[in-house]
Image (cartoon, helix red, strand yellow):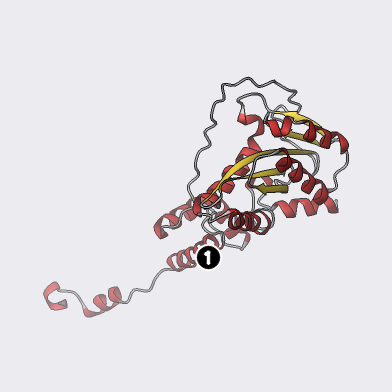
Amino acid sequence: MCRVLKLPKSTYYQAAHKMPSAYQIENEEITKRIREIHKASKGRYGAPKIHYLLRKEGFQVSIKRVQRLMKQAGVRSIIVKKYRPSSFQGHIEERENRLEQDFQTTSINEKWVADITYIHTHKDGWCYLASVLDLHSKKIVGYNFARQMTVELVTQALDNAIQNQDPNEGVILHTDLGTQYTSEAFQKQLKQHGFIQSFSRKGCPYDNACMESFHATLKKEEVYRNRYLDFETAKVALFTYIESWYNRKRIHGAINYLTPDEVETLCRAA
């Protein structure tokens, strides 16, 4: 072949045994770590979080390079399903909005938000998760999962949050105008612990955007990826996601790529 192509044998062997460059070797090493980080997050992390963790480990790599290597390796995060609020035509009494979309905080147990979301199971149909989130740490400080959407669903979630956090009086708790949150029992519970109640405006989910965001993340990263046989199966899965992953391991760009537990620990040590 060399005679036909009129090439020196040395040129042929050099081309056939060309060693990969240092850049190519580094790309292979980075791609390996990308796959490992992506797998450890169960496919939940995209380029920004993977890039942050790579930099934390000492890799001198740009976000564009991470995006390119992920694309070449066929690695991608779970696609976000955009939240589309549904309209409600019934009459709802407006109540005071003390939060006014001011989600800024200086420490934990200052502003909490709460809401209910639906989880479907094969045998038991629709079940309901009530969550309470601390706006400072992004931590789910309390939650309750039940087969029915009752007042007890939300009062128990708040009880769990109070037991876990032991907050001082004056915490602002913001919710929507759902009947569970406007009930006499829930308002009595808030007054008993010195909470200040705040409500979203009718038809404005952005007033409770942080809570909506958590439930959207929960659906994207856990619920939409699984089919739950019954209530108990879903209950275990939600416990594992919230306690083992979201609060303890999942880093958040909004809190400097710390976990909610890390933020709370720093606040309590200050």
Q: Quadrant of residue 17?
A: bottom left
Residue 40 falls in which quadrant of the image? bottom right
Judge by depth and name the residue closer to the eye, 188 or 248: 188
Residue drawn where x is 73% and y is 41% of the image: 152
Q: Secondary structure at mark 1?
A: helix
Residue 135 visible in the current orientation: no
Residue 133: give x, y in percent of width and height. 71, 43
Quadrant placement of the N terminus? bottom left
> In the figure, is residue 105 to the left or right of 237?
right
Furthest-left residue in this view: 4
Q: Closer to the camera, 198 or 100?
A: 198
- Reply above or below: 227 against 209: below
Circle 1: is it few (<14), some (14-19), or many (20+) Cα within 10 Å?
some
Q: Percent position (x, y) of residue 128?
A: 62, 44
> Residue 258 in the image: x percent, y percent?
69, 53
Type of amino acid under label 1? Glu
Residue for badge 1: 36
* Residue at image location 81% in from the left, 43% down from the top: 109
Quadrant of the image occupied by residue 194: top right
Count of numbered tags: 1
Q: Is residue 33 above or below residue 66?
A: below
Give x and y (percent) for residue 79. 48, 47
Query: Do we see residue 169 in this rendering?
Result: yes
Decide if residue 265 is on the left or right side of residue 248. Answer: right
Q: Nearer the viewer, residue 36 or 57?
A: 36
Residue at image coords 69%, 47%: 255
